[in-house]
Image (cartoon, rainbow, N blue to C red):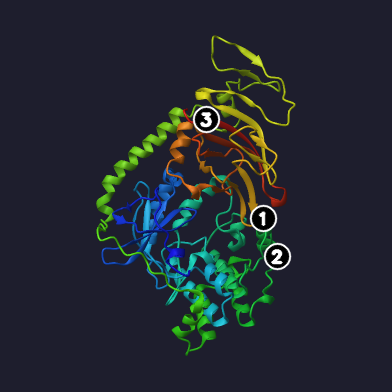
Amino acid sequence: MDGASEVFRPLEADDPAEVGGYRLTARLGAGGMGRVYLSYTPGGRLVAIKVVRPELAHDPDFRRRFRREVEAARRVRGAYTAELIDADSDGVPPWLATLYVPGPSLTEAVARGGPLSVPAVLWLMAGVAEALQAIHAEGIVHRDLKPSNVLLADDGPRVIDFGISLAADLTSYTATGAAVGTPHFMAPEQATAGEVTPATDVFALGQTAAFAALGEPLYGSGSAPGVLYRIVHEEPDLSRLPEPLRPLIARCLAADPRERATLAEVLRWCRQQLGPDAGPAVWREVLGQRHTPATPPTPDPTLRLPRPARLRRRRTALITAAAVTAAALLTTGLAWVTSDAGDGFRDWVAGASPTAGPEESVRTPASGGEGDRTRPPRTSSQPSPIASGPSGAVAYTSLWLDAKKSLSFAEPVQRQDREGDIRFDCAEVGCSLDSDSSVFVQVFGENAASPEVCRFMLSGTDSDYRHWPLAAAANGSQICVRHPSGEIALLVIRTKSTALPESAFMQVEMTVWPKAA
């Protein structure tokens, strides 16, 4: 990064002023698990505070895994890791603090200055291998090692986000049977949902090193399914790599995890190739003009001292219990339909009999004792609402999302262009829902979401939630949407086809609740 304006962004109106006693001074970014902020320890050390996203924080399974992974990560002490120094897994929301690493990610460094030299790649591999040794020694498998999780500090690389991401990934991915990780840097066993072991991280180390040497992913770009197919079924083309790097990277990328190099072998190889005279000057050459350290914001003179997590535990546990209880009441007491979130949910909104046949019998909302009426099949290409339900809710079925169609809160709901509030996009690393104005949150659980549940889950969301990856979404998944007008919608995925991104589509049901509901 060139300067503070590119690294340290001012806090926004919806950002907290402090987390766990740490006074926040700037926003560093946002990721799959939540937002990241800059703060200071009482002694003036810079720390990165990671605050968990609301939809994860409200998931009891996530909290349990997060607590376990935090405790394991606390024990990791390595020269090439970003040390975890504080955390509160029972906080509202949960958070953790790691030492801040003033340096670009490998992704940013390569984008700025191009591929690294052979000595630089060897230094990188040695440092990351040593970091992985420290991580594996505590029984943790990183699972998501990639260039953006390797930071380039002045004295060597630093591996971040080890272990912790597993809690978030398991919550959102394993329920659907999907693989966990970043497609372009997965190992074959991850891509096929097989057993993940320390050797999985070795494969990712080889891919990360190849990226550093080539300036692009070794297995090419394109759609995630295409990349994963090549990782599983094809031998990588190592001919483009500098010759001195090929034998080691080939060992790391062996298809059979048992045949991959060990981390000790990686370290020995790198040291032999670098020679006894290699010193820190080699690494300083790596950085060169790739990194001009930004000046962090001056700490607020009223900075509050962090309190140990154990002193906060009783207070935050009580708050968490109240929040979880409230969420449970909302989910069980106010969500009137259960299980498949499909026809049953539509029937609740419309008042239809769950056993209605092709000419579905639809009961209008109770008004003056009006009885049932039969709705004839629609012939128009523009879906009509099934009926108005409780609180003025309106439900639509057979809505279509693809590269050319979108959805809108206003009529027409089904649009034959890309001008609607809700769009469907398939990028290189997967498909997503996108909007210029509305925000998304996926609801995990068996019960169909009510408007109260959606409002609860969407509280505190901002522009970071206008892009929602669909890797964790399967048929029957529910996604809450909030429009700037205050209207809330619930999307229920009926059919999702993303194997071929160029022809990907989703068929959904959408229920819209008015602002006053």
Name the amino acid type tagged 1.
Answer: Pro
Residue 118 spot, x, y in % from top left: 57, 81
In depth, the one of 39 and 180 nearer the eye is: 39
Image height of 104 relative to 449, above or below: below
Residue pictured at 63% horizontal, 78% vertical: 246
Label 3 secondary element: strand
Residue 26 lies left or right of residue 192; in this view the side is left
Q: Earlier in the sequence, mark 1 or mark 3?
A: 1
Q: Quadrant of residue 347?
A: top right
Residue 238 spot, x, y in % from top left: 67, 74
In depth, the one of 36 and 156 nearer the eye is: 36
Disc 3 designates what residue? Answer: 513
Disc 1 designates what residue? Answer: 225
Label pair 1/3, CB-CB below 8 angstroms = no
Name the amino acid type tagged 3.
Answer: Trp
Name the amino acid type tagged 2.
Answer: Glu
Question: Residue 234 bears which disc, if any?
Answer: 2
Question: Badge 1, how many Cα within 10 Å: few under 14, some, many 20+?
Answer: some
Q: Earlier in the sequence, mark 2 or mark 1?
A: 1
Choose mark 2 or mark 1, whichever is in front.
1
Residue pictured at 67% horizontal, 57% vertical: 223
- Residue at the extreme top: 369
Q: Earlier in the sequence, mark 3 or mark 2?
A: 2
Choose mark 1 or mark 3, whichever is in front.
3
Choose mark 3 or mark 2, whichever is in front.
3
Image height of 373 relative to 6, above or below: above
Residue 501 spot, x, y in % from top left: 69, 51
Label 1 secondary element: helix
- Residue at the extreme right: 379
Label pair 2/1, CB-CB below 8 angstroms = no
Residue pictured at 50% horizontal, 53% vertical: 32
